[in-house]
Amino acid sequence: MSTLWKSRYANRTLGLKSSAIRELLKVTQNPEIISFGGGLPAPDVFPVKRFEEACHKVLSEHGSQALQYGTTEGYQPLREMIARNLARYGIVATIENVLITSGSQQALDLIGKMLINRGDRVLVEAPTYLGALQAFNVYGAQYVTVPVDDDGLITEQLEASIRSGVKFMYVLPNFQNPAGVTLSEGRRQQLILLADKYGIPIIEDDPYGKLRYEGEHIPPLVVLDRENVRRDNGFTLGNVIYLSTFSKTLAPGIRLAWIVAPEDVITKLVQLKQAADLHTSTFNQYVAYEVARDGFLDQHVRLIRTVYRERRDAMLHALREYFPPEVTWTHPKGGLFLWVTMPEGTDSQALFQAAIAEKVAFVPGDSFYPNNGHEGGRHMRLNFSHSQPGQIFEGIRRLSVAVKMQLHANHVAH
Amino acid sequence: MSTLWKSRYANRTLGLKSSAIRELLKVTQNPEIISFGGGLPAPDVFPVKRFEEACHKVLSEHGSQALQYGTTEGYQPLREMIARNLARYGIVATIENVLITSGSQQALDLIGKMLINRGDRVLVEAPTYLGALQAFNVYGAQYVTVPVDDDGLITEQLEASIRSGVKFMYVLPNFQNPAGVTLSEGRRQQLILLADKYGIPIIEDDPYGKLRYEGEHIPPLVVLDRENVRRDNGFTLGNVIYLSTFSKTLAPGIRLAWIVAPEDVITKLVQLKQAADLHTSTFNQYVAYEVARDGFLDQHVRLIRTVYRERRDAMLHALREYFPPEVTWTHPKGGLFLWVTMPEGTDSQALFQAAIAEKVAFVPGDSFYPNNGHEGGRHMRLNFSHSQPGQIFEGIRRLSVAVKMQLHANHVAH
């Protein structure tokens, strides 16, 4: 042990729980295990051929620029493309409102760095995305939680939480990770009004918005905020920062995401990003632009929707088939995940061990609560995008064996 | 202005000076300006064809893995290759000692995050790499500086500075950015002994080590530390963290660098990196591995050395030809930069404006000192890697016009 280093570590809290998950997920490297654990897109729909053509084009036409240092803000044609794409969803943004980041995780890190002083309280959904908790933990965030139900964040419980004092709110309105639920339009309106009433900014994380398998598109918070709130304090874009990514629509291995924010906020984030990694890979930005352009992104998203819808349906079908009646789950209208709730008293960590013995994996629910909250003990997150339908059926069958054993053990113990 | 956001910014210091530089350097986008400002590699030696072949191979053979999420530590074959390469320089490292980062800037950010509590003092060379100051500033670093001369950091002045209380030391022993000087072997030994005596860890930043144009290779600090110091406190690798990168040998646009450190330090850095950007682009890591393998990296470095040596010589020649005798400069044995010292009283910011009027650019020296130190006022950093020899001659001629005007104005004023 290099004690010299250890004694010099700064006082930064880490999500230790999350590194426990990393260890757990290593177990699932075993190819015999069917994993519903990760948040992985299906590799069988990666547009590999299109990437090959794009790499060829970028290197033969723009080799010198694509391999060189670039600006911190990002590759201009890509930012323009993103701004145009946002406009289709009613998000009014120019290139000056768009910052390219090295994946959404970096967007969360930069936002944490920009906003959080040690001890600041951040309002999050319970459960919420564990990567956001990890990013904010580093800066010493404390958390205020508001539970979700099938219509997303329960805004009826929001005002009291806001009044307890929070720096900003972090929400995933569409097909939330981990619960798979979607914030209803009515609640979006309520959220926006309360945010405005108390002057609390919102971080809207929308990695899955394009992956809707049923129902109607609901306008994002950043649009409702702009439409509904009349402010006299000179906002140009409003008090919602909007995040999205190519990880779920093109490929996560290129680490490309973006932040949409008022211009002066972008300026601040650019300074922080410059200190964090100078800029995101120029090469990947050129390649993603060539991959996505001329309507390919839309066409490819249609394919992903078809494939993932089938997998979601397979998982819902298998759950109905195999799981005991005292277990319930969400019905996601899009995204990658669903959320299973077991009877009070179930220990999802023990269930995880039992599941591994049956050669199937998931992420135990407690990982998605700040402060390793025990609320998560009876939940599990299941990913349905990564496995093919046949595997999903077999995996859910195996998991049902572990669940039944666990419920039985529980029953005996009480 | 979105005042709501501004009022919520955390108390993090930024290198404001550095954003001033960004503004200055925007001026140099003008193609009529010959820029010695950036730290850009020569795009004409990027191995574009080899990148094309690598992309084709990676996508056709490993498309599903290369476009998928990867581990935070990095792509295993790439880490193995780096460990093998380090061994050739006497650096004893296994894959467990190597973490892939999104450029060296991220390595500096993660190290700052790991080690710096607000107010901690970091010992740096004066002048030093401005990206390191930016990275450390964010975490509230204070600085203790030790000047450099032609043999690098003046270790004779080191002990008093260490005794004033520092958390760690940050040094660039080879062809330092910005001064272009190299730390002599004798001084490396002194530095190591003092670091050991006072238990002060060292960050050794070595982006240019392979780009030596004359003289003998000098062992890195991480090797001398291991060889010379007998410790009884159980170190496995020692108290030097070593950084290097592909930015100056393959291409900066792929944003690939690495940290070499004791295993438990890597574990800590992995947790911080996971929260910062999950992992570095899987695709770029696969591609860089294919580009670098089978001896290509060595072969390509030989080419770069030939090209950059010629450019360095052109700049040294042009400086002797055009610059007035009261101006001096360093003679870099490698790397990308040389450092010009003008007579006392010269204002490098005013000189910058005069130079822009002559259509030539450089980075004013004060940018490379913490706290915007006035020590830098009479210096300029010149990059010789990015321009071809003919341009270098013309650029130095233009710059000499600005310098002579400035010296004359100075003379008249005093």
Image (tube, coloured by chain):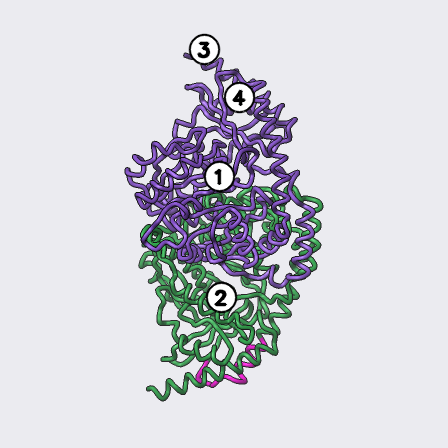
Chain colours: A green, B purple
**Does the magenta run of residues contain A316?**
yes
Kind of residue at disc 1: Ile
Which residue is labeled 1 in the image?
B218
Q: Rate crowding at label 2 as few (under 14), some (14 to 19) or many (20 or more) other CA atoms within 10 Å.
A: many
Which of discs 2 and 4 lies nearer the camera? The answer is 4
Which residue is labeled 4 in the image?
B354
Element at badge 3?
helix
Which of discs 1 and 2 lies nearer the camera? The answer is 1
Stretch in magenta: A313-327
Kind of residue at disc 2: Gln
Tell me how far mark 4 sits from mark 3, CA to CA. Answer: 16 Å
Which residue is labeled 2 in the image?
A176
Checking the image for residue B412, the label placed there is: 3
Residue beneath the point at 58% across and 54% down: B285
Residue A380 visible? The answer is: yes
Does residue B376 appear left or right of residue A251 in this picture?
left
